[in-house]
Amino acid sequence: MRYISTRGQAPVLTFEQAMLTGLARDGGLYVPESIPTLSTDQIAAMAGQSYEEIAYTVMRPFIGDTFSDDQFRDLIAQAYAGFGHAARAPLVQLAPNHFLLELFHGPTLAFKDFAMKLIGQMFEAALTRSGDRVTIVGATSGDTGSAAIEAFRGLDAVDVFILYPHGRVSEVQRRQMTTPTESNVHAIAVDGDFDDCQAMVKDMFNDFQFREDVRLAGVNSINWGRVLAQVVYYFSSAVSLGAPLREVSFTVPTGNFGDVFAGFIAKQMGLPIRDLVVATNTNDILHRTLETGAYTKGTVTPTISPSMDIQVSSNFERALFYAYGQDGAAVAGQMDDLKRGGFTVSQGAIDALRETYKSGRASEQETSDAITAYVRDHGELLCPHTAVGTHVAEAHLGTTPMVTLATAHPAKFPAAVERATGIHPPLPPRMADLYDRDERITRAAHDLPAIQKIIKDRIAT
């Protein structure tokens, strides 16, 4: 299995190299040279299997000879052993043909744990084998950072630096990043928004001298390993609802497009997905693009669903790559135009995107109203991001089962949930002392050289 860049000018890599590299040297994102498929019999055989067994079947064709079969099974088992539900990603029925996929039973109560815990295990295994050490730098709008710090804290071969927008993540998200005591993890509060943090991370990867000096690696959703691990729960949930003999649809609250792109990969592998619905909040660049064909950056508006407060959606580049028939030059041209404020997707490419993805948006009031309604009418307490998803999903319900991805636990956003319901969602017992723990925060200006110096100084001590 070989991996190529969406911009067509970077070296072809193995799975291990693509995983450890993150962003390609031409600025693109790695995707598999070809997408392996599973037979109807292979998918049907997943019925009744454990999440770990399904994960092995789905991911094994993508990893080549990076890990042996037994080692890969062990890494998967270690990754999910600490999850708080035996099913890992259980389904809950909300209404006829509408289901909630609970992806918040991991250690940081968000869907990012499914990918990050496995990435942590795979990084440590690969680096231990080679004797190398890397520096992970990532940007977060909330959940990626806490999941990365949780996955890599205390590991011997990795230093982790997470950039997050100061004052624009929830208190629980912030404390999950700033209270770990291990010396190899660092949270940096940047004056700016998520797009500013993400741009600086990309600039670091494109600063080849810095990249080599610190052995830079990335675990944002730009990392192919992250996307791959998220493909699994599309299979586990769809099979529970009758796949491969029955089509299933998914609504995915998303800002960076990685989670819904994982659904595209599942569909290409042979999973009978009817609709993939992109659900956005008022920062609705993805919905606007699918409606108009114009990808034009606007101002990021802070919302009660902060993990989706994004205007530059990194993984959309992967979707464009397939919409343009895997034409790296065309994608590179669009990304150059994005630096100048935006671009217009060609008619052929936008038609291809619309064949794969539907979309919708939820205003702040609609999000809050959905939180209120779902606890009143269905007995389900939703986080604001999941509420965006359920609101958008309602416009796409039909005879095909619809699965809305519940991306985070409501306790990660207690203020918004309490305002909508009068209920203060409690943290699970294992996290009950989170508000009492000491925090370690590094405050930084939106200044790339200054942040690079912080990273160099910390890994040198």
Image: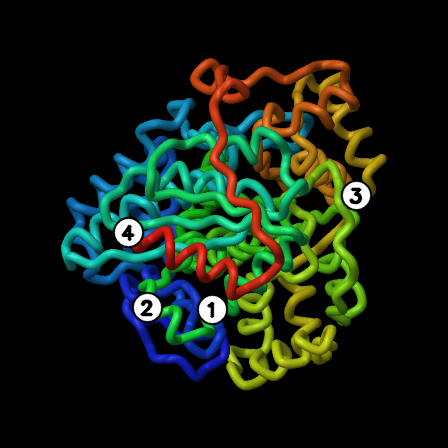
Q: Which of marks 1 and 2 is nearer the N terminus?
A: 1
Q: Earlier in the sequence, mark 1 or mark 3?
A: 1
Q: Name the residue under label 1.
A: 29
- Where residue 213 is drawn, which disc sits there? 2
- Where residue 362 is drawn, which disc sits there? 3
- Who's the residue at 34% across and 27% down the image? 82
- Secondary structure under badge 4? helix
Crowding near the residue tagged with mark 1, few <14, some 14–19, many ≥20 C-alpha atoms within 10 Å: many
Rounded to the nearest angstrom, the CA distance separating label 4 from label 2 is: 19 Å
- Determine whether 323 is above or below 432 in the image: below
Tell me: 32 left or right of 320: left
Q: Do the residues labelled 4 and 2 touch (CB within 8 Å)?
A: no
**Observer-nearest of 9 and 209:** 209
Q: Name the residue under label 4.
A: 123
Crowding near the residue tagged with mark 4, few <14, some 14–19, many ≥20 C-alpha atoms within 10 Å: many
Q: Which of marks 4 and 2 is nearer the N terminus?
A: 4
Front position among marks 1 and 4: 4
Rounded to the nearest angstrom, the CA distance separating label 3 from label 2 is: 44 Å
Rounded to the nearest angstrom, the CA distance separating label 3 from label 4 is: 37 Å
- Who's the residue at 48% across and 39% down the image? 146
Front position among marks 1 and 2: 2
Residue 41 seen: no
* Residue 248 sits in quarter: top right
